[in-house]
Image: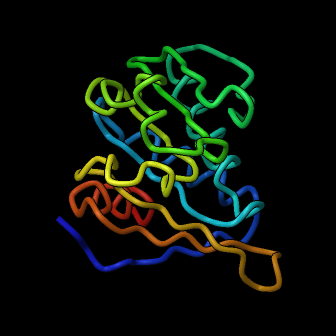
């Protein structure tokens, strides 16, 4: 189900971290976030904050590197979390080798550069489109796609 793209302003890196923490609290197994935006728009910063917050809620602390070179990093919190950076994929068929399709159903998945998924993007995914604003001093994130998940996030963020 598609929704209009409500946008949230993230005036500084701390706001992006807080947003990641808030989102981590509403995600469930099988939720997929497609993280779009140019390099430096805050995708990895957001994903790192989300994962660290989810791990900390379980009393766990782990370094959360960018998966640019490994393509996928996985974490065990209360459920499995997959963080994928698909920038280096050259064809959507390479997804099968990564095991992402089954993770879409069983884990929380954060996918950077989701355009590389082609037609394999899950229909229930929520797209977060990050963009630099105010001459790069702040960010805006627009949510589209999964209406129910977008509403849960907005409620928690505004609440």
The structure residue drawn at horizontal position 36% and vertical position 43%, both measured from the top left corner, is 32
Name the spot of residue 82 as percent of width and height, x first.
Answer: 49, 28
**In this view, 151 is above or below 45:** below
The structure residue drawn at horizontal position 64% and vertical position 73%, both measured from the top left corner, is 131
Q: Nearer the viewer, residue 110 or 68?
A: 68
Image quadrant in which you'd find residue 80: top left
**In this view, 21 is above or below 67:** below
Image quadrant in which you'd find residue 146: bottom left
Q: Nearer the viewer, residue 122 or 45?
A: 122
Residue placed farthest to the bottom in the image? 134
The structure residue drawn at horizontal position 72% and vertical position 75%, both measured from the top left corner, is 132
Q: Is residue 137 left or right of residue 91?
A: right
Residue placed farthest to the left in the image? 1
Q: Quadrant of the N terminus?
A: bottom left
Q: Nearer the viewer, residue 157 or 106?
A: 106
Q: Quadrant of the C terminus?
A: bottom left
């Amino acid at each position: 189900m598609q929704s209009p793209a409500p946008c949230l302003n993230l005036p500084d890196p701390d706001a992006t971290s807080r947003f990641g923490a808030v989102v981590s609290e509403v995600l469930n197994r099988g939720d997929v976030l497609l993280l779009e935006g140019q390099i430096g728009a805050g995708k990895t910063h957001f994903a790192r904050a989300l994962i660290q917050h989810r791990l900390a809620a379980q009393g766990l602390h782990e370094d959360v590197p960018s998966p640019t070179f490994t393509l996928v990093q996985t974490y065990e919190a209360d459920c499995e979390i997959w963080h994928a950076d698909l920038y280096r994929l050259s064809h959507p068929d390479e997804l099968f080798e990564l095991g992402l399709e089954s993770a879409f159903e069983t884990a929380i998945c954060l996918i950077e550069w989701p355009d590389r998924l082609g037609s394999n993007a899950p229909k229930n995914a929520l797209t977060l489109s990050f963009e630099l604003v105010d001459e790069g001093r702040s960010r805006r994130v627009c949510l589209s796609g999964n209406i129910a998940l977008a509403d849960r996030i907005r409620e928690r963020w505004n609440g």
